[in-house]
Amino acid sequence: MTSPESPDRAHPSDEALNDFLGLLGYSSLGSFALLAEDAAHAPDMASRLMLSRMAAGELAGIDRVEFLVAERGGDFDALMASYRDLFAGYLLRAVPRDWWERLVRSYVGYNMIQDMLRNLASCVPEGLRAETAASVGSSGHDDFVAAVLTPVIASEPQLAARLGLWGRRVVGEALTIVQRLFQEHPALIEFACGEQDPGLRIQRLVTDLQAEHSRRLRRLGLNA
Amino acid sequence: MTSPESPDRAHPSDEALNDFLGLLGYSSLGSFALLAEDAAHAPDMASRLMLSRMAAGELAGIDRVEFLVAERGGDFDALMASYRDLFAGYLLRAVPRDWWERLVRSYVGYNMIQDMLRNLASCVPEGLRAETAASVGSSGHDDFVAAVLTPVIASEPQLAARLGLWGRRVVGEALTIVQRLFQEHPALIEFACGEQDPGLRIQRLVTDLQAEHSRRLRRLGLNA
């Protein structure tokens, strides 16, 4: 496969690559923290064990990402730290009032970030694609939440209405994060698939993310 | 090796064994939660990554423990749940006021539980010893905390005094947990090494735990 759209797609600079690897690393660490916090709030032992295992699984690829950064002379901790405040903002602006809202927050935000990383990882240059794609996990978090929430939502219309509103609020926060991400780290745009024009590239990515989000909400029985 | 002290040491009942495996499982899950919470409070990215990795590592053996319980017809989630409130009590009664107190709380409590599990695992019947010992990790948490705290304690006498007091308080809470553990789960006494008399067995275990604790505090430059 070739990347005809842009001659520099095949050879991103080490700096741009490290920016992307820092994002991968911080996403692992942030997802670990998010799922571990959810696990700590789980109302039953089975959910707690399941979410704890998913959290631990998020770190499975981070050693490799750290190595790739070191190979390029990057400072992994500093690269990761450059994403910290941005992602912390999502959690601060979307504080759940109960277990259901907590599940929806992670269902929306965590899975959107995974979709975005999958998109970016699928568009990195060939030589590095397999390595970076491997670090975007498929934890089964969406299946877990759907199995828990779908029957509850189907049987409780008031909760369904509240979670529908909540879902719209948190997706707004999540999309804001995605857009600010590319504003704060313009080198990442290089890694997004598609058109030459950077603005169009991001627009297409966001459209794809929204479509995936709508599909996921419908799966729960909620309107996106 | 034989176990001459007690004829039933070689063949604990499945019920007693499941009680012990439930403790191993819950300790993994509880240690995961403790270290993940510490990671979330870490002041720098390197410490956060280190503690997150240690947390994830705590779950490495839990699949095997779950399998051993299922093999004996036990309900893993219910067995783990029987330890939840006891261990949660330690965290509720020892709320740290800053990062240093948080590090000391885990240094004291987490490492004491690991010592206790190592002691019990070393005394289970031969056939099961290797399997259970493998699930008691050596995460390097004590080395990490010693590397961080020893220079700080050496250079700040006021902090050293405060952490010395704090260490004595949290070890009191930790030893209370250990003693209540055997009161609430008397079948576990079967797994402790040593004398015939159950009371003496626990007494010896507690003495060993205190000695290890004192050694660990001295390593930081604190008096136990």
Image (cartoon, coloured by chain):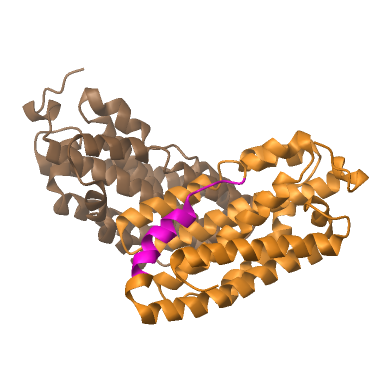
Chain colours: A brown, B orange
**Range of magenta residues:** B136-152
Judge whether residue A158 can be spotted in this image.
no
Q: Quadrant of residue B200?
A: bottom right
Judge whether residue B30 can be spotted in this image.
yes
Which quadrant of the rendered structure holds the C terminus of chain B? bottom right
x%, y% of residue A54?
A: 50, 45
The residue closer to the viewer here, B192 or B98, is B192
Q: What secondary structure predominates along the stretch shown in magenta?
A: helix
The residue closer to the viewer here, B176 or A123, is B176
Query: In this rendering, is residue A170 above or below A26?
Result: below
Residue at image position (48%, 74%) is B96
Which quadrant of the rendered structure holds the N terminus of chain B? top right
x%, y% of residue A36?
A: 49, 55
x%, y% of residue B222?
A: 47, 72
Tell whether B7 sits left or right of A163.
Answer: right
Residue at image position (43%, 52%) is B52
Residue at image position (16%, 49%) is A185
Query: In this rendering, is residue A133 above or below A4?
Result: below
Q: Quadrant of residue B149?
A: bottom left
x%, y% of residue A205?
A: 24, 41
Residue at image position (13%, 26%) is A10
